[in-house]
Amino acid sequence: MNFQKNLMYLRRRRRGMTQYDLAEKMGTTRNQISRWETGARVPDLNDIILLCLILEVTPNELLC
C-alpha cells in the first residue's frame, strides 16, 4: 500500500471517520484531507505526527 491508500483505509475502516471528521480533529479542511488521499498534496511532518496520534497508528503503519 502507499500513503494515500493507507490514510483512506485507516480513516474509514479502522476509525470509521469521514474526511470531515478527520479535518475537524486536525484543524484543517476536508479538501486538504482529500488532496492527501488523492496524492495531489503531501502532508508536512507536523501533519503526519498529528495523523498518527488521531488514527492511533505508528508513522510506519501510515507511510508504508
Image: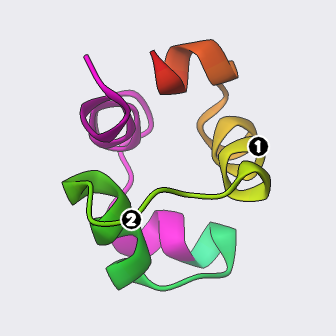
Could you tell whether 61 is left or right of 64 in the image? right
Which disc, if any, is residue 49? 1
In percent of width and height, residue 10 lies at: 39, 32
Q: Report the front residue among 58 and 55.
A: 58
| Colour scheme in use | rainbow
Could you tell whether 10 is left or right of 28 in the image? left
Query: CB atoms at circles 1 and 2 under 8 Å apart?
Result: no
Could you tell whether 10 is left or right of 38 in the image? right
Q: Residues within 10 Å of mark 2 (few under 14, many from 20)?
A: few
In percent of width and height, residue 14 lies at: 39, 27
Q: Residue 3 colored magenta?
A: yes
Residue at the image point whose x is 38% and y is 39% from the top: 7
Residue at the image point whose x is 40% and y is 67% from the top: 33
Q: Give the CA distance from mark 1 to mark 2.
A: 16 Å
Is 38 located above or below residue 15 in the figure? below
Please provide the residue range marked out in magenta: 1-23
The kind of residue on which mark 1 rests is Ile
Q: Report the front residue among 20 and 63.
A: 63
Q: Which secondary structure is most common in the magenta stretch?
A: helix
Which image quarter: residue 16?
Answer: top left
In percent of width and height, residue 29 lies at: 47, 85
Label 1 or label 2, whichever comes before in sequence order: 2
Quadrant of the image containing the C terminus: top left
Q: Which residue is mark 2?
A: 41
Q: Residues within 10 Å of mark 1 (few under 14, many from 20)?
A: some
Is 26 located above or below residue 2 in the figure? below
Q: Secondary structure at mark 2?
A: loop
The kind of residue on which mark 2 rests is Arg
Could you tell whether 7 is left or right of 53 in the image? left
Q: Report the front residue among 57 and 39.
A: 39
In percent of width and height, residue 32 lies at: 42, 76
